[in-house]
Image (spheres, grey):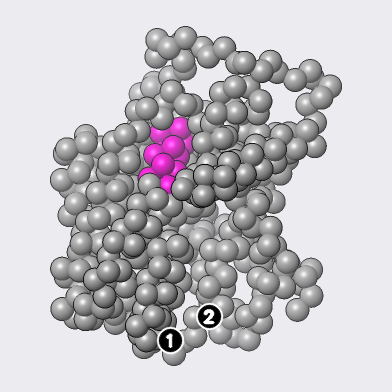
Amino acid sequence: MDQLSALTIIALVYAAANLLAMKTRARVSMMFICSVIFLALFWSGVPTTLFEDSKMVPLATSFIALLMVQMGSMMDARKLREEWRTVAVSFLGMCAGAGAILLIASPFISWNYAVAATGPVSGGVVAGLIMTEAADAKGLTAIGVFVTMLLTVQGFFGIPIASNCLLHEGRKLKARFAAGERALTAGQTGTSKWEKVIPPMPQRWQTSYVYIAKAFVVAWLSFKTASLLGNAVHPFVMALLFGIVFHELGFIETNIMTLGNANGMVMFAIMIPIYIRLAKATPRMILDLLGPLFIVFGATVAGIFIASIFLSKIFKYSWCLSAALSATCMIGFPGTLIISEEVAAQLSGSDEEREFVLSHVLPKMLIAGFTTVTIASVFLAAFLVKFF
């Protein structure tokens, strides 16, 4: 397939899914609808090389780095100190989900399948690859396919949970907004406004090209720094941290990619890696693994929901928010961003109300996603793989 045809198909799927998500008021996420449509297209004869033919896959990593910088530019560094509860809730919720697989699912699907499932379900691609390589080394080919399927469909379970839980949380925030509450500024919180080290650019220099160039510089520096550290800190995490630091210093502006009129295209590109594995999911593969998949995800959801009841009491978050944060282990980035923006947009009647809702849920969802998928899941998978 030629590049323009592939891009057109992807764009039409995104648009249709976005309209349907709006129609359901975010009860069914755009990402979930995209997954269903892409599966239907592949099974009806659309080339499975659709995403490769778009030529956007090689750009995805760089664009994700840019969006990490963008997210960092939107975060208030002083608020991050308050998010230790988010880290604790998301991490413990993820561990509860993994533990439930081992305790509840293993009698039905065998111990090896249960151990292998903890990697992708409690995190993302890296955790899944750890499990797949270990299974291949032991000649457990079927388990490798099982892990691939878990990675392919985990969003079908995690996205609706997070989306609907955030909708409940968003309604509470909407009520607080209607009662007169507003997002606090630095002055209102008693914190003096941070003196930027780097002064703002002259007005005549504030162009889209300059904004984009500055974002690329920060992304490049973050990846080089991560490389020098042997990637002990994940490059995407480093890009987020650099975005926060350089925003606080004044080098990059708030919402820098939006100022550069590039946020939409960046989002278009970085969503492609989410769906690329769907090209390998055949109907027969889905049918053969349907039972084990439902058992694994049923156990995971049960573990997360039960843990969220206790976590909400311990850390003083609502049950819905605790469940949404824990479910990020089945979503990851950019799903955490997209779901947060969808919920805020669907619940809000004004830009101010949308920003109020988003300012409460987005930082928590992003931090939870990085805690589970990017960091904790890799350590958990590396530990549990020893129990094959």
Q: Identify residue for label 1.
A: 285
Mark 2 or 1, nearer chain start = 2
Residue 58 position in % (x across, y down) = 68, 62
| Residue 328 colored in magenta in the image | no
Q: Nearer the viewer, residue 29 or 64?
A: 64
| Residue 361 colored in magenta in the image | yes
Which quarter of the image is occupied by the N terminus?
bottom right
* 158 w.r.t. 226: above or below: below
Q: Say few, some or many: other residues with alpha carbon within 10 Å of mark 2 (under 14 / 14 to 19 / 20 or more).
A: some
User: Relative to 306, is 285 on the left or the right?
Assistant: right
The quadrant where residue 357 appears = top left
Q: Residue at x 56, y 35 (%)?
A: 242
User: Relative to 106, is 215 on the left or the right?
Assistant: right
Q: Secondary structure at mark 2?
A: helix
Q: Which residues are magenta?
A: 358-370
CA–CA distance in space, label 2 to label 1:
9 Å
Label 2 close to label 1 by CB (< 8 Å):
yes
Residue 60 position in % (x across, y down) = 64, 57
Q: Residue at x 66, y 43 (%)?
A: 220
